[in-house]
Image (cartoon, rainbow, N blue to C red):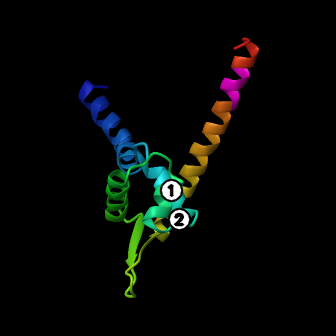
Amino acid sequence: MSDEKIFKDCLKTLQPFNDTLDIISGKWRLQVIIAIGAGCNRFNIIQTNIPKITPKVLSKELKLLEANKIIRREISTGYPVKINYYLEPYADTLTPLINAIRDWGLNHRSKIIKAMKDTGG
């Protein structure tokens, strides 16, 4: 097998991962998606429920998720104007991924805690 074919095969394999990570990577994006999915629909409520996220970063993440059709922004016509964020139905496709990441994190934490106990740490 030539090096060029290996390179192309590798790129072809990695591209879907890169596409996924472009959307969910970073410290805050999954947390924003999870918060909105849990019913935190207003900007201030989302910010309150995600410790240490700044308004500037939250605004940037919301815009990116909206541009990628993961969330939608709804503006009320009443007074005062209210902006709410909701998950798009397409966001449901992330549920298995989010659950797998959560489960891996729980298992990893248990493994590390057990290893620390075993070594007396």
- Tell me if residue 70 comes above or below residue 17 in the rendering: below
Q: Quadrant of the C terminus?
A: top right
Q: Amino acid at mark 1?
A: Thr
Q: Which residues are magenta?
A: 110-115
> Going 37% across and 81% down the picture, which residue do you hit?
81
Alpha carbon distance from label 1 to label 2: 9 Å
Residues marked 1 and 2 touching at CB (< 8 Å): yes
Q: Residue 105 location, x and y as percent?
A: 61, 38
Q: Nearer the viewer, residue 4 or 32?
A: 32
Q: Nearer the viewer, residue 51 or 62?
A: 51
Q: Quadrant of the N terminus?
A: top left
Tell me the residue that label 2 is attached to. Answer: 40
- Tell me if residue 29 comes above or below residue 46 in the rendering: above
Q: Is residue 59 magenta?
A: no
Q: Residue 68 location, x and y as percent?
A: 34, 61
- Tell me if residue 89 comes above or below residue 18 in the rendering: below
Closer to the chain start, of discs 1 and 2, is: 2
User: Quick one: SS at disc 1?
Assistant: helix
Q: Residue 50 location, x and y as percent?
A: 50, 51
Q: Nearer the viewer, residue 83 or 93?
A: 83
> Going 63% across and 31% down the picture, which residue do you hit?
108
* 69 left or right, relative to 121: left
Which quadrant holds residue 118?
top right
Which residue of the protein is positioned furthest toward the top in this rendering?
119
Structural crowding at the residue carrying mark 2, measured as other residues with C-alpha within 10 Å and reported as few (<14), some (14–19) or many (≥20): many
Q: Residue 17 location, x and y as percent?
A: 40, 43
